[in-house]
Image (tube, grey):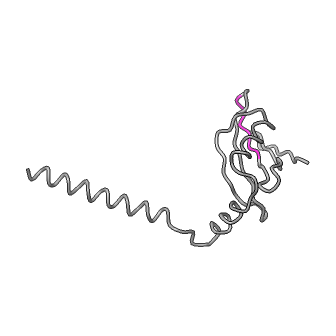
Amino acid sequence: MTKSKSAIALLIGGGLTLGMGMMAFAGPDRDGTGDQEHAAFQAAPIGLAQAISTAESQSGGRAMSAEFETEDGSGVFEVELLAADGTEIEILVDASTGQVVIDHDDNDKMEEKD
């Protein structure tokens, strides 16, 4: 009976430690950049799903991941795709216009889009 009580206490203690660590990890940004990025994301007329769709149709690839970030004060979606030939492509979609701004292939060549 004492072993089971010890095991339960250990599990509860471990759970509390893990929970507190996760709360610290999810805390607010110390430098405030997250607030600016959140505001830019909320104000963007283009959503994540539309940015992924645009990147996939523009490249012919399939999205592996996507995230919102600010570059030079403007919101962009960075979409990473995998082309049919196995090439990894990174495309930036302007969050205000929905237009492809820049794309990168796996050799880090950049192509500006008009």
Residue at 74% x, 43% y is 90
The furthest residue to the right:
114
Side (left or right) of 57 relative to 42: right
Residue at 76% x, 56% y is 45
Residue at 75% x, 37% y is 56
Q: In the rendered view, would you say 63 is above or below 11?
A: above
Side (left or right) of 64 relative to 12: right
Quadrant in the rendering for residue 109: top right
The furthest residue to the top:
85
Secondary structure, magenta segment, majority class: strand
Is 89 magenta? The answer is yes
Quadrant in the rendering for residue 75: bottom right
The furthest residue to the front:
45
Q: Position of residue 22 (x, y in %)?
A: 43, 60
The one nearer the camera, 21 or 110, is 21
Q: Position of residue 85 (x, y in %)?
A: 73, 27
Residue at 76% x, 41% y is 55
Q: Position of residue 70 (x, y in %)?
A: 73, 60
